[in-house]
């Protein structure tokens, strides 16, 4: 799937380059990622810090996926969607962090034009898919808590697969639109991206054309998408909270609140930084880079921690998995 999506993006980059040459402009063949601004003596400490974060992100999310696949008691829609979320967190981090690490240690900051196109597409494809997935997870909790008697008949395996596929398809369409709209602009220099990866706001500053329409489209498209998903999530949780408050069982109420609190915390951690960045596409403040690090590097690490600490079933399953590993050698 990745190769099939990459081919049209590389073709777009080639077409853009030919149009630049035909218009008597020198096309940019590569970009230089400036990265995070830091004193030279902090390069190695930053490399080690981000390496540890990346390793924990991959291992933590991988452990969640392994636990859900191995433990049959977790073979339910909620944890199936959690597997998708963990996979998205791993891949988002993998799209961004390895290039950052190369910049810290090897001072390798050059990225080809085609590589920049693919990185921007991949990031928005995965990020938009995650946005849809959060909404889907909220809907799943709404059905489980507000319509428990109908939940099993509504959220069947086929329905879960269909809805999960829809989130990936939606992310693909959204990212193809955003990426093609950005890279139809001429890039004739400078080629220094004042950011640590190729993203929409940073690339707009390098375009050799008026970007007003692009900024407006980015604001409307991403703003509408984020606001719609967020409002659907809040609506779902409005019904969920009302249903929880009507529960007679204190244990049931506590378990429901604990599970939903984990999801809502993750949603807020995801949406607030994204809103700060993409509803101001023309901004170029130093704080933007710090916020971007939070939702591209830190948030994928926090998700498995939050879900593990706030979810009793997941913690129990992890202990069972650890117990199985202890027993196996004997």
Image (cartoon, grey):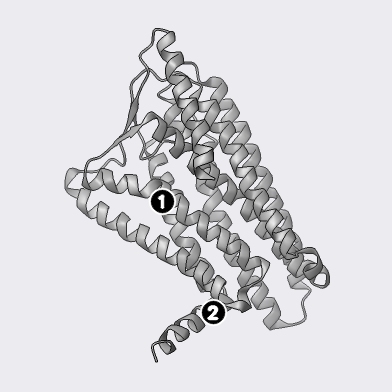
Question: The N terminus appears in which quarter of the rendering?
Answer: top right
Q: In the visual, does 85 lie left or right of 294?
A: right
Instruction: Give the distance between the C-alpha atoms of the residues marked 1 and 2, in whole angstroms.
Output: 27 Å
Q: Nearer the viewer, residue 273 or 76?
A: 76
Residue 266 in picture, x, y percent from top left: 55, 59
Disc sitting over residue 151 in the figure:
none
From the image, tell me which residue sits under label 1: 94
Can residue 202 be seen from the camera position used here? yes
Look at the picture and state if 277 lies above or below 132. Answer: above
Q: In the visual, does 325 lie left or right of 148?
A: left
What SS does tag 1 mark? helix
Q: Residue at x 58, y 63 (%)?
A: 82
Question: The C terminus appears in which quarter of the rendering?
Answer: bottom left
Q: Residue at x 44, y 23 (%)?
A: 14
From the image, tell me which residue sits under label 2: 317
Q: Residue furthest bottom?
A: 330
What SS does tag 2 mark? helix
Q: Nearer the viewer, residue 90 or 262?
A: 90
**The image quarter in which residue 113 lies:** top left
Look at the picture and state if 50 lies above or below 108. Answer: below
Q: Residue at x 77, y 81 (%)?
A: 248
Q: Residue furthest top?
A: 24
Q: Residue furthest left?
A: 41
Residue 272 in picture, x, y percent from top left: 54, 48
Can residue 237 be seen from the camera position used here? no
Q: In the visual, does 145 lie left or right of 275?
A: right
Look at the picture and state if 104 lies above or below 325. Answer: above
Tag 2 or tag 1, which sits nearer the N-term? 1
Circle 2 packing at 10 Å, graded few (<14), some (14-19), many (20+), is: many
Q: Nearer the viewer, residue 214 or 252?
A: 214
Residue 103 in picture, x, y percent from top left: 27, 43
Q: Nearer the viewer, residue 269 or 330?
A: 330
């Amino acid at each position: 799937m990745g190769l099939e999506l990459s081919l049209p993006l590389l073709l777009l980059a080639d077409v853009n380059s030919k149009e630049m040459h035909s218009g008597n402009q020198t096309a940019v063949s590569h970009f230089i990622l400036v990265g995070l601004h830091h004193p030279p003596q902090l390069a190695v400490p930053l490399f080690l810090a981000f390496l540890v974060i990346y390793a924990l992100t991959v291992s933590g999310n991988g452990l969640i996926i392994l636990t859900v696949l191995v433990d049959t008691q977790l073979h339910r829609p909620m944890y199936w969607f959690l597997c998708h979320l963990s996979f998205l967190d791993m891949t988002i981090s993998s799209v961004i962090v390895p290039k950052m690490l190369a910049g810290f240690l090897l001072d390798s900051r050059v990225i080809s034009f085609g590589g920049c196109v693919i990185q921007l597409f991949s990031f928005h494809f995965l990020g938009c898919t995650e946005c849809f997935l959060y909404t889907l997870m909220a809907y799943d909790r709404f059905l489980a808590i507000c319509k428990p008697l109908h939940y099993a008949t509504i959220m069947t395996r086929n329905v879960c697969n269909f809805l999960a596929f829809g989130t990936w398809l939606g992310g693909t369409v959204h990212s193809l639109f955003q990426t093609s709209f950005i890279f139809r602009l001429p890039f004739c220099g400078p080629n220094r991206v004042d950011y640590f990866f190729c993203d929409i706001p940073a690339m707009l500053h390098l375009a050799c054309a008026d970007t007003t329409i692009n900024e407006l489209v980015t604001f409307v498209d991403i703003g509408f998408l984020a606001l719609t998903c967020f409002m659907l999530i809040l609506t779902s949780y409005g019904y969920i909270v009302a249903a929880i408050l009507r529960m007679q069982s204190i244990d049931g109420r506590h378990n429901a609140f604990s599970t939903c609190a984990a999801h809502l915390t993750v949603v807020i951690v995801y949406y607030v930084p994204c809103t700060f960045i993409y509803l101001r596409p023309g901004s170029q403040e130093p704080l933007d880079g710090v916020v971007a690090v939070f939702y591209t590097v830190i948030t994928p690490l926090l998700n498995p921690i939050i879900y593990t600490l706030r979810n009793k079933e997941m913690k129990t399953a992890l202990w069972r998995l650890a117990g199985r590993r202890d027993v196996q050698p004997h």
